[in-house]
């Protein structure tokens, strides 16, 4: 220190710490001259002493003016050293860098100025301090003082020039510094970083592309910056790198693909678009390098296919097609399981386009790598089944194509149908909305006969009798109406003369036994008219319920369609098809006379010509006078005689007697099952009555209120079957249960058909205001009054057939008749009541039901003691 003081005059030392810049500047010039003389003399010890004095006494001084003078002095000493300054950089540069973090903005400014002058002198030798200088400049670029920022920018440009000229710059040491700062959010720092990336990338000797994965994510992060200038600079840098990738023979696609996949799901639209554009180029250029990353790339592409931005959609679809056309092998690292996992995940996407492309991928994988896909079948099968409930028809079609592709193997074919039936069982809405669509499509994609045979085999062993009956009815309706099954219908028509038709008929018969109407339909289709007539006559009272009548109504209407044109034409020869006539008349006898189906069938039968049958009868009676009968009515004995003559040829080896036993056995199982359910409901009702509160009992009236449900939504179990008035008009005693013979015109029989069904509630039902409807027929009048509880008052709606009353949906009906309580079973909730609908698929609502009840009450109303019928909802 003493040597330095002896070298530098006291006045110079004093002026270096002066508050005036001009005095500090003049003092620095004198220091420069002194150092220049010492350098010329080669006295480096004194030079070291001078630098030490400037550092310790000035740059590290607590006084700002001293620090300013010290910085100017160090810069002057470096200028005085010129080419020999390199030897003393270790002493000169660290104090200057330390001043970059000074609290005084003017000190930071002079530090920039000092380092700028030092860098101009030493140039390339300055590189050894590059990392420290880069870190300091990064901070100063965001300095709060505008003058400091300006000085830092000048220094930054100089350092960039030095780096681009130097061959000592180490990119390997620089990249970690860049990487750790790329996620900084400050816009000035981001501009600083992008500027350095662009400059270094322009240097031919520096391979920035090889280190692109280290800072690529940071560049993509800048694309969503609020500053347009920063977004533009980042996009420009990325575009330049992408062009270099296209021209480069070797690129590390894998690491960058991982980054792009993440950025493709960015909430920022511009970031997503840039990311998907890069992915598109990578798929075209990457080749085998990208095989292990196919699943990740697919996971990024599928959501973008449904992006709200059309440009992103277009690029994503193009990329998806490119990726799908690549035929990679599992041996090359192609992971079929991972691809399936991605496709499965996106099957639950809210966007239809994404779900569709996911299914396309599963289909492609099945075609190319069937064995591998089937090994993962358990992981995706349930998801594929759930997709059958998709609101999009196109999605369901593709799902069925995938299922059909899986079902090419017999084992998987059977599993598909088993799982499908399980899905129908668990989701009634699926069967109701999509059942016919699914079955028809499967019949197209797979062999229709094979589908029906396997379904029949499964349903034959079905333990859930209610579901089996519903499913058979659905399959039967599809068989009768679907154009896709026309060949199957033609084969069934040959059942009595063709071996293949016979086998199909027998196979379907086993499961069709779950539904009487399905069996009758099958026999009519197979032209087994004698057996159809026998089945009709074998039905007992319990078989003829609402469900049966609904199905019968559908069948009668289907008889008028082109599908049964052959049957109607056969009626032109009644003598040759007498069993057909008998079967149709049997069905007519089962229909209520006021129903539309009854009128349709009766009208059809009236058109049957009598001349053909009369001619045959005349010939027969001429040979046997004992068989003379009226020309207008066929003789039953003659019918039986004609049929017996050709029975052996028609049966084609089918044992119809055994088939009838099979049908009756199945129907007996259904009856037993229904009785058990009724008994369980009865027991449940008894238990609920025992725990009823006494105060509630007191408030209830002895008639209608006694059986009234406590809540609109409660289901009241059955207490017995509907009592029916006798022909003599005797009144049943309280609690008495009367089993009446089946009479289609009897209004109470109509009600008995309704007892196992419920009427679905609509949100806008007028009945929501009240608790019930009273139907009270009056003497000397047909019809009656419908009184609705609530604000609507009393309405006489008999003449309008109750059409103004909205459809009602109720959990149960309570019918009180002459002191006898009848409560329909609460089962079948949610079923639609289909009776006498104007079209084959229409829904008969409560309006029409009540209208029919009023009409059928005509005869009862004219009796001397008219009953009162109360129906509560």
Image (tube, rainbow, N blue to C red):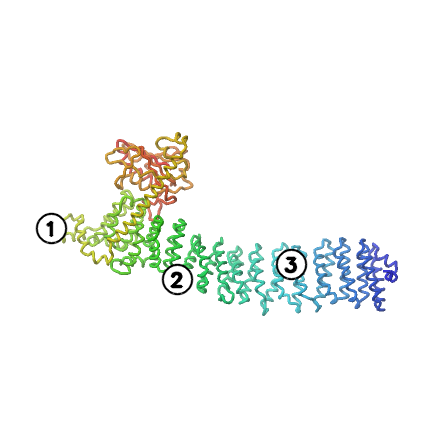
Residue found at x 37% / y 55%? 439
- Residue with the mark numbered 3: 182
How dense is the environment of label 2, judged by Cα within 10 Å: few (below 14), some, or many (20 and up)?
A: few
Q: Nearer the viewer, mark 3 or mark 2?
A: 2
First in residue order: circle 2 vs circle 1: 2
Q: What label sits on residue 16 in the rendered view?
A: none
Q: Which residue is mark 2?
A: 409
**In this view of the protein, which residue sits in the foreground, 409 or 42?**
409
Disc 1 and disc 3: Cα gap in Å?
113 Å
Q: First in sequence, mark 3 or 2: give its number.
A: 3
Residue highlighted by disc 1: 625
The x and y percentages for residue 509 are: 29, 54
- Quarter of the image containing the N terminus? bottom right
Left or right, 99 with respect to 400, comes to right
Would you say 781 lies left or right of 831 here?
left
Residue 785 sits in which quadrant? top left
Q: Residue furthest top?
A: 698
Residue 256 drawn at (x, y percent): 58, 62
Q: Nearer the observer, disc 1 or disc 3?
A: 3
Between 868 and 2, the residue placed more toward the observer is 2
Q: What distance separates the C-alpha of mark 2 from that of mark 1?
A: 65 Å
Crowd rating for badge 1 (residues with CA inside 10 Å; few <14, some 14–19, many 20+): few
Q: CA distance from mark 3 to mark 2?
A: 55 Å
SS category of the residue bearing label 2: loop
Residue plotted at (27% across, 49% down)? 664
Give x and y (percent) for residue 306.
51, 56
Where is 281 relative to 831, above or below? below
Secondary structure beneath label 1: helix
Res 314 visible = no
Closer to the eye: label 2 or 1: 2
């Amino acid at each position: 220190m003493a040597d330095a003081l002896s070298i530098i005059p006291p006045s110079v030392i004093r002026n270096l710490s002066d508050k005036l810049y001009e005095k500090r500047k003049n003092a620095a010039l004198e220091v420069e001259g002194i150092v220049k003389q010492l350098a010329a003399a080669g006295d480096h010890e004194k030079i070291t002493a001078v630098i030490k004095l400037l550092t310790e006494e000035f740059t590290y001084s607590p006084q700002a003016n001293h620090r300013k003078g010290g910085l100017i002095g160090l810069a002057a000493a470096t200028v005085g050293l010129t080419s020999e300054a390199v030897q003393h950089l270790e002493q000169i540069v660290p104090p200057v860098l330390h001043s970059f973090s000074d609290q005084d903005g003017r000190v930071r400014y002079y530090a920039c100025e000092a380092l700028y002058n030092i860098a101009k002198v030493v140039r390339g030798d300055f590189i050894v301090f590059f990392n420290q200088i880069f870190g300091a400049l990064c901070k100063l670029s965001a300095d709060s003082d505008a003058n400091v920022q300006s000085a830092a920018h000048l220094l930054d440009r100089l350092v960039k020039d030095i780096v681009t000229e130097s061959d000592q710059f180490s990119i390997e040491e620089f990249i970690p510094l860049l990487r750790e700062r790329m996620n900084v959010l400050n816009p000035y720092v981001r501009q600083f970083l992008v500027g350095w990336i662009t400059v270094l990338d322009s240097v031919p000797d520096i391979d920035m592309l090889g280190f692109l994965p280290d800072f690529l994510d940071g560049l993509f992060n800048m694309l969503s910056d609020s500053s347009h200038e920063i977004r533009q600079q980042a996009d420009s840098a990325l575009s330049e790198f992408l062009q270099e990738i296209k021209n480069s023979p070797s690129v590390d696609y894998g690491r960058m693909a991982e980054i792009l996949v993440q950025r493709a799901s960015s909430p920022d639209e511009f970031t997503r678009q840039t990311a998907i554009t890069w992915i598109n180029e990578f798929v075209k250029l990457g080749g085998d390098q990208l095989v292990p990353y196919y699943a990740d790339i697919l996971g990024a592409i599928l959501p973008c296919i449904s992006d709200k931005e059309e440009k992103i959609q277009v690029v994503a679809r193009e990329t998806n097609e490119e990726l799908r056309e690549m035929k990679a092998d599992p041996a090359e690292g192609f992971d079929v399981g991972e691809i399936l996992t991605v496709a499965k995940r996106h099957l639950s996407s809210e966007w239809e386009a994404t779900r569709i492309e996911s299914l396309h991928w599963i289909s492609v994988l099945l075609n190319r790598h069937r064995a591998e896909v089937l090994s993962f079948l358990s992981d995706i099968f349930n998801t594929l089944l759930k997709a059958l409930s998709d609101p999009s028809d196109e999605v369901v079609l593709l799902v069925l194509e995938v299922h059909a592709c899986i079902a090419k193997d017999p084992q998987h074919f059977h599993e598909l149908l088993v799982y499908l039936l399980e899905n129908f069982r668990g989701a009634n809405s699926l069967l109701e909305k999509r059942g016919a669509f699914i079955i028809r499509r499967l019949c197209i994609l797979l062999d229709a006969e094979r589908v029906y045979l396997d379904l029949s085999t499964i349903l034959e062993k079905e333990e859930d009798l209610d579901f089996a009956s519903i499913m058979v009815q659905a399959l039967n309706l599809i068989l009768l109406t679907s154009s896709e099954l026309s060949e199957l219908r033609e084969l069934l028509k040959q059942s009595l003369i063709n071996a293949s038709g016979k086998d199909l008929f027998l196979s379907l018969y086993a499961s069709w036994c779950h539904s009487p109407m399905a069996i009758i339909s099958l026999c009519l289709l197979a032209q087994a008219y004698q057996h159809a007539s026998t089945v009709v006559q074998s039905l007992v009272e319990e078989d003829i319920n609402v469900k049966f009548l609904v199905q019968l109504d559908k069948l009668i209407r289907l008889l008028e369609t082109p599908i049964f044109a052959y049957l109607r034409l056969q009626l032109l020869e009644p003598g040759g098809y007498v069993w057909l006539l008998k079967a149709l008349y049997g069905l007519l006898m089962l229909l209520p006379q006021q129903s539309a189906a009854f009128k349709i069938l009766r009208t059809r039968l009236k058109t049957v010509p009598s001349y053909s049958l009369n001619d045959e009868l005349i010939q027969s009676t001429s040979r046997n006078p004992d068989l003379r009968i009226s020309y207008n009515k066929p003789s039953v004995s003659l019918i039986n005689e004609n049929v017996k003559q050709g029975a052996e040829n028609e049966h084609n080896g089918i044992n119809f007697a055994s088939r009838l036993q099979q049908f009756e056995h199945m129907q007996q199982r259904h009856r037993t099952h229904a009785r058990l359910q009724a008994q369980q409901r009865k027991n449940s009702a008894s238990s609920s009555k025992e725990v009823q509160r006494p105060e509630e009992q007191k408030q209830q009236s002895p008639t209608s209120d006694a059986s009234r449900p406590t809540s609109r939504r409660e289901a009241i179990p059955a207490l017995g079957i509907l009592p029916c008035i006798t022909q003599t008009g005797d009144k049943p005693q309280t609690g008495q249960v009367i089993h009446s013979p089946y009479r289609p015109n009897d209004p109470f029989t109509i009600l008995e058909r309704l007892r196992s069904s419920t009427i679905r509630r609509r949100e806008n039902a007028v009945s929501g205001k009240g608790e019930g409807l009273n139907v009270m027929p009056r003497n000397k009048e047909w019809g009656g009054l419908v009184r609705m509880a609530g604000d609507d008052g009393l309405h006489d709606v008999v003449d309008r057939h109750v059409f103004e009353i909205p459809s009602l949906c109720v959990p149960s009906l309570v019918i009180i008749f002459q002191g006898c309580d009848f409560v329909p079973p609460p089962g079948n909730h949610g079923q639609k009541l289909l009776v006498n609908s104007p079209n084959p698929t229409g829904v008969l609502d409560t309006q029409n039901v009540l209208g029919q009840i009023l009409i059928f009450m005509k005869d009862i109303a004219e009796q001397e003691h008219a009953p009162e019928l109360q129906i509560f909802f």
